[in-house]
Amino acid sequence: MDSLINAAARALATGDPLGALKRVALREDAPALALRGIAMAQLGDFDRAKTLLKSAARAFSRREAVARARCIVAEAEIALVSRDLTWPVKALDGARKALEAHGDHFNAAHARNLEARRLLLIGELDEAEQKLAGVDPALLPPPARAAHELVVAGIAIRRLQTKPARSALGRAGEAALHARIPALMAEVKSAALVMDAPAARLIAKDGQRLLLLDQVAALFASGALVVDACRNVVRSNGAIIALGSRPVLFALARVLAEVWPGDVSREVLIARAFRGKEADESHRARLRVEMGRLRAELKDIAEINATKDGFLLEPHDARDVAVITPPTEEVHADVLALLADGESWSSSALAIALGTSARTVQRALEELSGRSKVQSYGRGRALRWVTPSVPGFPTSLLLPGPLPGD
């Protein structure tokens, strides 16, 4: 490559896209097109960047397999940043294999990191960890090492492994400082904020208070019976009973846990679980049926006994009972949690990440938009959704993935 191409590449590596464009803005050869595409991506013009990178990939000859593969990796990164989760994953996997075969281990590692970041977004934590297992971060340059450690931290945070998460964030911060790229340092700093932000609200017999991630992890390890309104599960001593698809049962479990060690009247249970309906004989009959179902679900960790006025939760081994909720309880909190990363999402990408239908996500976005919780721009397939900053709104306990402790 000539001196201008080399200078432009060095500028991009240090986070100076304008400096790179000054050197190659008027050139149409394949290396210049690729560098211009990466520069436009760093400047946030993703559509133009994708066009340039596609042109560069076509301009490289078949003998230049490494260069073509690097263009595909760059396209994949743009797709990830722009939350285009429908981008062909097989193309990235093929590019990674081509780079490994030709000895370009740095860009192959970058491709692995992109695959892991995509898997992290959609909650496939085990698969993301497997992708990272083939990379030795010590051999990576500082920018790639920081990106690698951010993914490691993200996986640990989703699993509530707070000590490994803090260690990974510390290593990411050191690598970002060595890289001297302001945008990367800001990304690491933003990621670290979640460790010191309220992650949940605790409701227990001694009152309510906000919990950090470390405190949530400690609560789960304490042996208490916890009704987790972030994941819609009931957990005790390692046992986890998922009630996400049984909203009435979860509502009943939550009310029983909130007033433990006391009992709850039938009228209160009917009002909370059946959404404010006045209690009559049909509702009382339904309550008995639902309590029987809840009793069967919780039989390994607790009993539910009838009292004169209502029902009482009695855990088997747990010495305490608590409820945790998001610090700010919102309708469609899972959608808001994904949008809280500050990136713009399409409804189809949200549906992929949440594992639900696009129509369900569209209805949620329309409702949130009506309450000014989210905003949209663009039209048709280019329609994207963003959210204004919501102070104190959590993400880690609401993001998709395996249940903490799995």
Image (cartoon, helix red, strand yellow):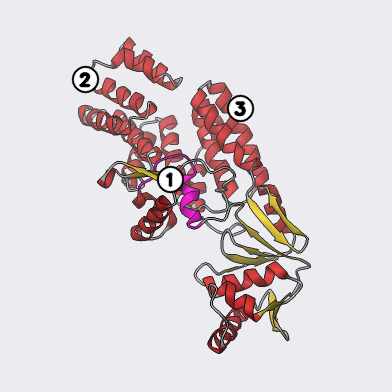
Label 3: how many Cα within 10 Å (few below 14, some 14–19, many 20+) = some
Residue shown at 54% from the left, 75% from the top: 274
Residue shown at 31% from the left, 43% from the top: 91
The magenta segment is 331-346
Label 1: how many Cα within 10 Å (few below 14, some 14–19, many 20+) = many
Horizontally, residue 66 falls left or right of residue 258, namely left
**Quarter of the image with the C terminus in it:** bottom right
Distance from disc 2 to disc 1, alpha carbons, whole Å, reads: 31 Å
Is label 1 in a helix, a strand or a loop?
helix
Residue 196: say if magenta.
no
Q: Which mark is residue 118?
A: 1
The amino acid pointed to by label 2 is Glu
Q: Nearer the viewer, residue 337 or 164?
A: 337
Distance from disc 3 to disc 1, alpha carbons, whole Å, reads: 24 Å
Query: Which comes sooner in the sequence, label 3 or label 1?
Result: 1
Residue shown at 71% from the left, 50% from the top: 215
Q: Which mark is residue 8?
A: none
The amino acid pointed to by label 1 is Arg
Q: Which residue is mark 3?
A: 174
Furthest toward the front, the residue is 278
Residue shown at 24% from the left, 15% from the top: 26
Residue 331: percent from the left, percent from the top?
A: 50, 58
Residue 334: say if magenta.
yes
Q: Which residue is mark 2?
A: 28
Query: Which comes sooner in the sequence, label 3 or label 2?
Result: 2
